[in-house]
Image: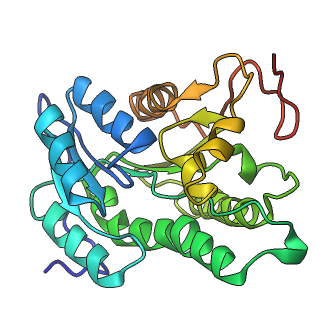
Amino acid sequence: MTDASVTPPARPSVPGTPLRAVVTGASSGIGAATVRRLRAEGWDVVAVARRADRLTALAAETGAAAVVADVTSDDDVARLVAEVTGGGPVHALVNNAGGAIGTDPVEGGALDDWRAMYELNVLGTLRVTQAFLPALRASGRGDVLVLTSTAAHGTYPGGGGYVAAKHAERQIATTLRLELVGEPVRVIEVAPGMVRTEEFSLTRFRGDQDAADAVYRGVDEPLVADDVADAIVWTLTRPHHVNVDLMVVRPRAQVSNTQVARR
């Protein structure tokens, strides 16, 4: 197993060979859409998530490699890194795994919900980023992309736990960028607003489909997963001397976390 604390020798990309990306949370939504977009751009992609059946289907559809792993597990991430880095250089890490649980006010927020959101959105991103940084650096043109949210930039009632987690996740990106100055690694943040996917709101409302649907009711064209994947892939495919520090992506109908036009 590769020791992630030791920087491997530099393996700059050979002209004409595909770039290679790791995408977490790839079994659905924005993660799956990002895998599809990167494959369409000619990248080699390792799709990572906990659900083997969905990853297998995505791999069959796109030609991506699939690794079943939980980003909240030290053992899983160590195995992931060993498997991926053993197969060649890594040029991009897309930290997409994350999610929201509940809409309770701060006064009544469940500690277990806040803890779970912090473990996934913050410590999961930290764990995977730390593990892949040596390989990204050694590639000679690495990217760390952190998918946060407009919740990382402003709050709203009932969003305290998710807002706190996304603010913390954002600081991983902003601090890491300062710490890697002068190195061949870009740090990119993409912060989506309202995105209608098959699972995000359903998970947040604990399987209540009516409550999940109400989030988007009357909104003229909320973003979909492919809109965000398009933004992610655009940032990754800029010339490597160009760093997109932050891209905030919202539907036209949404102007803030609390103001949305509805029919």
> Which image quadrant: the N terminus?
bottom left
Residue 57 lies in quadrant: top left
Residue drawn at the location 80% of the way across and 64% of the way down = 160
Residue toward you, 52 or 133: 52
With 76 as the anchor, is 233 left or right in this view? right
Q: Residue at x 37, y 36 (%)?
A: 34
Instruction: Give residue 234's quadrant in the image.
Output: top left
What percent of the width, then of the height, locates residue 123? 53, 74
Most foreground residue, 196 or 189:
196
Q: How many marks?
A: 0
Q: Name the residue rendered at 21%, 59% in the picture.
A: 52
Residue 58 appears in the rendering: yes
Residue 165: image location, x then y, percent: 68, 66
Coloring basis for residues: rainbow
Can residue 11 be seen by looking at this rendering?
no
Q: Quadrant of residue 40?
A: top left
| Pick the front one: 204 or 230 | 204
Left or right of 239, for residue 201? right
Left or right, 212 with reference to 5: right
| Image quadrant occupied by the C terminus | top right
Q: Position of residue 191 (x, y in %)?
A: 63, 42
**Position above or below: 9 against 72:** above
Residue 163 locus on image (x, y percent): 75, 59
